[in-house]
Image (spheres, helix red, strand yellow):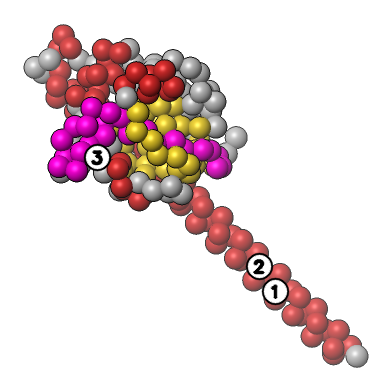
Amino acid sequence: MKRVQTAIWTAVLVCSAAVCQWEWRLNEKEQEQKSDILRRIAEESVLAEDYLQEKEKTEEDTLIEEEMNCVLEIPALGIFQGVYRGTQEEIMRWLDLWKLAAADQDMELGKRGIVIYGHNYPGYPGGLGGLAQICIGDQFFLTNREEQWCFQVESISVWNRQEAVERLVRPILPESESWLLTCARNPDGSNAGTYLAVRGTLRKIVKLRDE
């Protein structure tokens, strides 16, 4: 009987040790993923700063002050780009530099819903190129240096400019939703004169730093 009890307790201890090791490895993997996200955000920030310093040599009067709101990642499309904010003039300049921009300078991750502008030219990798290939159910992520917000695509619409502004830019949207907005294209690649609007609903928030 003693041998049986000893064998049972030994098995329990072995299982407990295995579970602890599994949890440790899982936690280690999560920490590696968080570190990788923070590293990529830092790289995006440095690239933007280097680019702007280069532009300063020839465009000192029109240089835009860097201000990254967050980073947008769309795994299904291979997009990983910083999202910048500023005045309407600065937003247009960011778009001209093939960056992404929040539709209003008061839009900030964690405070209100964000609408993200980006150009969309066939064959060009910058901006929101390829957004027309996104599907319902796809995920995209908005990440700052503290948190990663995971959104799932719930709807894909095509609106005219006035409708897009009235629906997305003028109202204060809840932080539980985020929108991607770019030019819609005809089958031949020409500008359709309308906007492709992709709505994402918040699914989870991942803390990147321990409090």
Occupied quadrant, residue 63:
top left
Residue at point 53%, 28% (across, down):
175
What label sits on residue 15 in the rendered view? 1
Q: Residue at x 66, y 67 (%)?
A: 19
Which residue is labeled 3 in the image?
129
Which residue is situated farthest in the top direction here?
61
Residue 94, by quadrant, is top left
Q: Is residue 53 above or below residue 142?
A: above
Q: Residue at x 80, y 78 (%)?
A: 9
Q: Secondary structure at mark 2?
A: helix
Horizontal side, residue 24 vs residue 39: left or right: right
x, y percent for residue 204? 56, 42
- How far, Cα to Cα, is label 1 from label 3? 50 Å
Q: Which residues are magenta?
A: 183-205
Cα gap from disc 2 to disc 3, whole angstroms:
45 Å
| Residue type, label 1 | Cys
Residue in the image at 55% along x and 62% along y: 25
Label located before the other in sequence (1 or 3): 1
Assign a secondary structure to mark 1: helix
Pointer 3: residues within 10 angstroms few (<14), some, or many (20+)?
Answer: some
Q: Which mark is residue 19?
A: 2
Q: Nearer the viewer, residue 46 or 175?
A: 175
Q: Position of residue 108 (x, y in %)?
A: 46, 23
